[in-house]
């Protein structure tokens, strides 16, 4: 069975949302990155970068959450991955998420919640860039419900995970109604509800799966 190594993080949330949407069977293996388990030799053998999420499927080991999303969607034949035109659009969003949205939001998290020496300039700077990326997403969602071909896909999953942290990061969706509507729609999907419940659950370190 596919093994999913993860923790309560935005990038692991993407993978759980996709596994639950596609119905692929899996074993969840918690890697407590706050206790440094990502540096254990066993885990480093899977991902020398020492980061979650990682999957192992019949000997095939894969890291990088967006690469994993693509792998899972193709494996399950889920969503839009059969059309070349759609896969180009999806890839564009996956690269945008990994190279822009993720790092911007990550900096906001760092300067708002992690940095030992506060830096108001850095926080303001990265919040402003993150808000600009939300506005960009908002324009794209003006006349459509989802990011690609108006069908829910891994592109939406990838972008949703950080948008779901906006409150916690002091970012606002008030002016970005399309993003707020899109995010609410995704939050109401049964797979999203189960995935969010699972990672909110304090018993995350007991290997278990969300109930069907
Ligand atoms: N680009 C990677 C980022 C993975 C990543 O940064 N994982 C973090 C948690 S979200 C992690 O494992 N951090 C542990 C560490 O850096 O020691 C992805 O999309 O999977």
Image (spheres, rainbow, N blue to C red):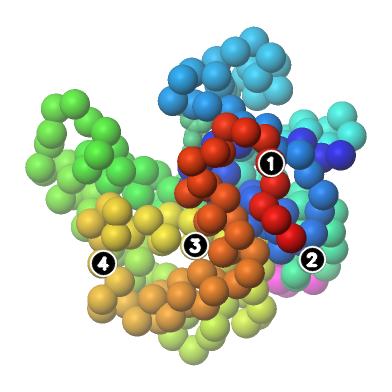
Q: Tell me which residue sits at (35%, 49%) in the image.
A: 105
Residue 59 against residue 88 in the figure, above or below: above
- Residue underneath mark 3: 160
* Magenta part of the chain: 83-87
Q: In x, y percent, where is residue 108?
A: 28, 46
Look at the numbered discs 1 and 4 and tell me whether their residues touch, using CB distance below 8 Å.
no
Label 4, label 2: how many angstroms apart (C-alpha)?
Answer: 32 Å
Q: Earlier in the sequence, mark 4 or mark 3?
A: 3
Q: Where, quadrant-wise, is the C terminus in this rendering?
A: bottom right
Q: Earlier in the sequence, mark 4 or mark 2?
A: 2
Checking the image for residue 172, the label placed there is 4
Look at the numbered discs 4 and 2 and tell me whether their residues touch, using CB distance below 8 Å.
no
Residue 57 against residue 142 in the figure, above or below: above
Q: Is mark 3 on a helix, strand or loop?
A: helix
Label 2, label 1: how many angstroms apart (C-alpha)?
Answer: 24 Å
> Is 161 included in the stretch rendered in magenta?
no
Look at the numbered discs 4 and 3 and tell me whether their residues touch, using CB distance below 8 Å.
no
Q: In x, y percent, where is residue 49?
A: 57, 23
Q: Tell me which residue sits at (75%, 69%) in the image.
A: 79
Look at the numbered discs 3 and 2 and tell me whether their residues touch, using CB distance below 8 Å.
no
Q: Earlier in the sequence, mark 2 or mark 1?
A: 2
Q: What element carries label 1?
A: loop
Label 1, label 4: how many angstroms apart (C-alpha)?
Answer: 34 Å
The total number of labels drawn is 4
């Amino acid at each position: 069975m596919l093994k999913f190594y993860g923790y309560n993080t935005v990038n692991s949330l993407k993978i759980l949302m996709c596994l639950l949407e596609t119905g692929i069977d899996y074993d969840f293996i918690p890697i407590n990155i706050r206790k440094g388990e990502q540096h254990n030799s066993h885990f480093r053998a899977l991902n020398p970068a020492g980061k979650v999420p990682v999957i192992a499927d019949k000997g095939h080991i894969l890291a990088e959450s967006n690469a994993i999303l693509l792998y899972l969607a193709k494996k399950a034949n889920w969503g839009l991955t059969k059309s070349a035109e759609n896969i180009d659009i999806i890839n564009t969003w996956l690269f945008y998420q990994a190279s822009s949205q993720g790092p911007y939001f990550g900096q906001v998290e760092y300067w708002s919640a992690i940095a030992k020496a506060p830096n108001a300039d850095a926080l303001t700077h990265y919040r402003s860039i993150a808000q600009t990326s939300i506005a960009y997403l908002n324009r794209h969602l003006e006349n459509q419900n989802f990011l690609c071909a108006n069908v829910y896909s891994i592109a939406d999953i990838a972008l949703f995970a950080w948008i779901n942290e906006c409150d916690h990061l002091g970012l606002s969706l008030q002016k970005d109604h399309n993003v707020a509507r899109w995010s609410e729609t995704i939050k109401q999907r049964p797979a999203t509800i189960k995935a969010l419940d699972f990672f909110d659950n304090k018993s995350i370190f007991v290997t278990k799966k969300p109930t069907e």
